[in-house]
Amino acid sequence: MYEKHIMICGATGCLSSGSTKVSEALIEELEKHGIKDKYRLVMSGCPGFCEVGPIIVIYPDEVFYCRLKPKDMAELVENHLVGGEIVERLLYKGPDVEAPARFYDTIPFYAKQKFNVLRNSGVIDPESIDEYIMRGGYRALSRAMEMEPQAICDEVKDAGLRGRGGAGFPTGVKWGFTNKAPGPKKYIVCNADEGDPGAFMDRSILEGDPHAILEGMLIAGRACGADEGYIYCRAEYPLAIDRLKKAIEQAKEYALLGDNILGYDFNFKMNIKEGAGAFVCGEETALLASIEGKRGMPRPRPPFPAQVGVFGKPTTINNVETLANIPLIVKEGGAAEYVKVGTEGSKGTKVFALAGKVRNTGLCEVPMGITIEEVIYDVGGGIKGGREFKAVQAGGPSGGCIPADLLDLPIDYDSLTKAGAIMGSGGLVVMDDRTCMVDLARYFLSFTQKESCGKCTPCREGTKRMLEILDRIAEGEGIPEDLETLDNLAHNIKDSALCGLGQTCPNPVLSTIRYFRHEYEEHINENFCRSGICKPLFNYKIDAENCTGCTACARACAVDAIKGEKKEPHEIDQELCTRCGSCIDKCRQDCIMITRVGSEADVSN
Amino acid sequence: MSSEAEVADINQDIDLSQVDSIVEPYLGKKEMLIPVMQKVQEHFGYLPRPAMEHVARRMRIPLSRLYGVTTFYAQFKMKPRGRYIIRVCKGTACHISGSPKIAERIEEILGIPGGETTDDLKFTLEEVACIGACALAPVIMINDNPHGRLTPDKMKEILDSYE
């Protein structure tokens, strides 16, 4: 028997901030006290709050320690584990709490969250099937075995589950198509090719709760009459692949995979396919081609994969997060519980990857229908560095931005689409006044242009022309007709591209023009980038009144463009300045300003 | 030119029996081409042309199709790569937190543009769509080590720490 369970976050975010070293230091300290055997150490899945990583949660005390360093471990072991005193110094502190917060319910980041999909992530050992089962795992599968396949499809449909990969198609309906398709051989495919830059919820689910995906796929297999599954996962997620492989081995041992599962006349074989780095493979027909060992290029639909899928057989393709919802719905009484959360058209929760200029970056799961404001200000803790909120980009390269005056927009499939964004896979990138919307549109388009598979002309050529125009605007060479041309091209691509990715790739351009037209016009007509991003379109200037002459900026400047005596106001030589922005990060007085190119000469002379 | 000469030299040393043992379990399974090429690349660090030709012959796949597949996916490299692979994250969060400036600074220090390898085969500079460590933006990975919350002035020291 263990006295306590110590969960160390072993997900990519915390690993990047050094959780391995923390864990080593912890083990060393425990050994020093000779008490290592009394505690169970688990490299757990992601508790979501990447901003304050590395994180350790101690159960049953329910204490959440964060921002840990290896040297903190001596104190943690001595005071908490040996002495029984909570180490207040290592608890969560922030401007949003009065006193150091001890556990999930007192940390504002978690207060508005609702854990469905992330129910086990960070709570169980992701490499232990027993812990998954103890938390009610595989119970839904055994119930599904007693049900008619069509009844399972109907139950999922009635629960209102919609695909979490982007388009939001009702999952139960999709299953019904495959179930009704003729033929003895059918497949279930899990789309874990999370290529949307700025989204990492699928990875966290795979790393934190791999058995939930297996269970979801098995239930889908039962409902669709399939006996083989593929998990198509990005090669960039080695930890996720590793955990899936372990989970599959364990499930085989427990007779949850293989022949006669749970003693029923139901067989299922599970395969993992590693992607090889192509964004377009997130599109379902491209993904199927890639599984078959071909170039991952989409094909026209119909026929839909439910009729003609992998190796020409009927196939259901579901996203990771969608599948993680399945066990919750299909378990005894699950569906009735499930529909209580969410809105009329969007049931359940959605996991978002909160990133960018927001204070609390990380992963959060919120009920559908919550407003953007609640997510950014209550969960996210507001804008970093106290700057001004400008917009949030939802849905990645297929999505759009939502400006400040739509902060009260509820997050559900239909409201987001109406606002010109999409739910997408769930990336929410927050932007402040130092983000240029022209540059953002250009960034997304250069991504989709690079990732365009080249099969259809609108996407291959159209995105290239749009990108050329945006490049010109960012270089200060824009002409007034550009906006109309962009709009024209965008609508043509939307109407005529072959696949979903091509059809949605103009969205970032359209939505930034819709909400930030004045920024485009400022770039084109006034040669000015107010955010200080498009280099030819602004100057830096030191505010002489506030400059204390601390020389921090001058020392940071790689090209010696900043001149001035110590304790005297400094000046920037515009001829030498490369606008790299190093000085602005160093200035403690916040006195380096962004000015128009023309006006700068007047001021400095 | 020098890098081409290097490629030729390295190619001469290719041990095709290694390729054989990789291909063997997958003969007759054309759908396994991508995993096979991933294993070949894992072995050599890149895809040498003789190895590609050999795989095509053994798996009975036209070389043109195999070439089509390997050039389609970003993961496959046709040129030898450095001992240290630097992957600059180009995800959205990293972009707006200044990853272009990080990339610029690395290019400046190493004297190579993105996608290239230094002459001494020490560093290869690449871009990656998203590492998924958005909370630590901007992030780079050097081999398997992530470095987060970067600023351009930290880059020299980080690169110097790799021998």
Image (tube, rainbow, N blue to C red):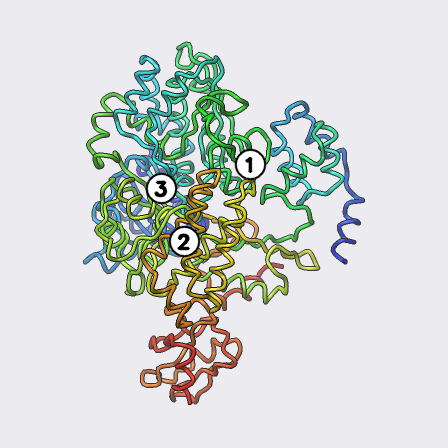
Quadrant assignment, res A603: bottom left
Mark 1: secondary structure:
loop
The residue located at (21%, 56%) in the rendering is A97
* Amino acid of disc 2: Asp
Question: CB atoms at circles 3 and 2 under 8 Å apart?
Answer: no
The residue located at (33%, 42%) in the rendering is A423
Q: Is residue A261 visible?
A: yes
Output the chain of dot 2.
Answer: A
Q: Give the number of the mark in front: 3 or 2.
A: 2
Residue B105 as seen in the image, left or right of residue A203: right
The residue located at (39%, 55%) in the rendering is A69
Give coordinates of residue A559: x percent, y percent: 53, 78
User: Dot 3 corresponds to which residue?
Assistant: A7
User: Dot 1 corresponds to which residue?
Assistant: A296
User: Dot 2 corresponds to which residue?
Assistant: A487
**Mark closer to the chain start, 2 or 1:** 1
In the image, residue A566 above or below residue A237: below
Q: In which quadrant will I find the N terminus of chain A? A: top left
Question: CB atoms at circles 2 and 1 under 8 Å apart?
Answer: no
Q: CA distance from mark 3 to mark 2?
A: 51 Å
* Amino acid of disc 1: Gly
Q: CA distance from mark 1 to mark 3?
A: 39 Å
In the image, residue A214 above or below residue A235: above
Give coordinates of residue B41: x percent, y percent: 65, 41
Q: Give the number of the mark in front: 1 or 3.
A: 1
Residue in the foreground of this view, choosing between B16 and A522: A522
**Mark closer to the chain start, 1 or 3:** 3
